[in-house]
Image: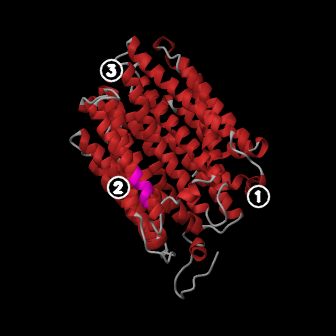
Amino acid sequence: MRKSSRSGKKSGAEVSASHVRLIFALVIIAVFLDVIDFSVVNVAVPSIRAQFHSSLADVQWVIGAYGITMAGFLLLSGRAGDIYGQKRLFISGVLLFVVSSLAAALAPSLIGLIVFRGIQGIGAAISSVTAFAIFMALFPEGRERNRALGVFIAVLSGGFAAGAVAGGALTTLFGWRSVLLINVPIGLFAATLIQRFMPSLPGRSDAKHLDLPGALAVTLGLMLLVYALTVASSDGISSLQTLVPLGLAVLMLASFVAIESRSHAPLMPLSFLRRGVVLKANVIAIIVASIVGGTGFLVTIYMQQALGYSPFYAGLGFLPPAMIFLVIGGWGTSWFTDHLGLRKTLLLSTALIVAGSAILTQLSPKWGYIGMLPGILIWALGAAMGFPAFNLAAIAGAKRGEEGLASGLINTSQRLGFPLGLAVFVAIASAVDPTISAVSNSASAIAGFDYAFLAAAILGMLAFAISMRIKMEGPLKKDLEGMGSEVAETGFL
């Protein structure tokens, strides 16, 4: 790696001789907290709902607020790291994540929990995007980086499984607050050692402009949109209580577009997004992530509400699909893209998502867990293949020097999909059965789940249709041949 231009200062190469493995492990630990957060809290949602006597539509904000703020601040955080230095931002993000986790764990009300979860999402955005930049600085390009990247991906892919099992065990043994409290000692440990052993990584960007208005506009617009969907599930789409926040959401998102078109350093350059492959890849990312977020949430509710599982056994129920994400998401997709090509991999991925979701529409409590397992496994296989594949398509659509922008944008699209899918599917389930918020296994309640899974299948068909329109010809095809599986793995992050 490069030598430092300042005497007496250690560069990434010099540090690697003594501390690189420790720093690498600490970076993984910090990002691991973000990765497991979705599944660990997901399993605890029914317990949170029971304590606060809240509806299904209201409690989904515990996950949705986190996803929205994280999506809204990812690109801004990456820009801030370039300006102010990755180490400083990384530690700040971890500490914000830790403090908000503690506050959320002690929240006396559901609204307090939701607010602190939103702040937690901002901390996660800062720490996760700067963590990958630190990783890139630790290892030189080539064999060493590729090997470390494989470890990085495998560990993070396993976070979904670890979160599901840990969330179930912690909730059963110590209550739902423990799934948030566990972040505090782990985060403090990582931040303390990073501060001590990691060399300073000063900002490298000459431009000092941060598009904070853009980040606030898109975050507020998305929150208003999800709120409108939440209200629609109980009051109807044509009610004044729904139309007012929906109109405000459209206004805020339109203002975001206006801000981006005039900003000197926009979060999302509109000319970049208008490229055919980039736009298609990001739309597929939003759709697939929405299916994963919404379906994963409803399956958790179904296992605990309709099947009567404890949080622990519901967590164990996620182990088979989680292992698919670990194996296929961590290593298998590069094999598929190498042998089938990117377009066919995306088509196979979305077809499996459609098939798995369609099987889940036939759920019945008398089938038990075994009856729902085939649908979950097929759905998980498709989703695990899809995440690295559409990341590859998004990055391949970028020109040289735009890889960071492409990676940040596709990660934002993924994060955006989770809360949107959650809100849409919960709204559909609640519209079919308004009493679904109560613990019930009535026929109407089951129909609510079935219609939500049907919506997932229809969205999967849309993603399949878009995948068919991705053309792998000309310069794009040539770029992909040069990138190989390394970009596929990198894009998964």
Residue 307 versus residue 456 in the image, above or below: above
Q: How far apart, in angstroms, are the residues tagged by discs 1 and 2?
A: 41 Å
Residue at the location (22% across, 40% down)?
109
Depth check, front residue: 469 or 413? 469
Badge nearest the viewer, 1 or 2: 1
Q: Mark 1 falls on what kind of element? A: helix
Depth check, front residue: 115 or 165? 115
First-in-chain label (1 vs 3): 3
Q: Is residue 70 visible?
A: yes
Which residue position holds label 3?
434
404 magenta-colored: no
**Mark number for residue 335?**
none
> As drawn, is 400 to the left or to the right of 120?
right
In the image, residue 304 lies at what x, y percent?
A: 40, 24
Residue at the location (38% across, 45% down)?
250
First-in-chain label (2 vs 3): 2
Q: How far apart, in angstroms, are the residues tagged by discs 2 and 3?
A: 37 Å
Depth check, front residue: 416 or 484? 416
Highlighted range, magenta: 254-259
Residue at the location (56% across, 61% down)?
405
* SS assignment for the magenta stretch, majority: helix
Which residue position holds label 1?
482
Q: Is residue 327 visible?
A: no
In the image, residue 68 lies at what x, y percent?
A: 40, 47
Which residue position holds label 2?
98
Residue 215 versus residue 222 in the image, above or below: below
The answer to which quarter of the image holds residue 167 is top left
Work out which quarter of the rendered image holds the N terminus and state it.
Answer: bottom right
In the picture as drawn, the residue positioned furthest to the bottom comes out as 7
Q: Mark 2 falls on what kind of element? A: helix
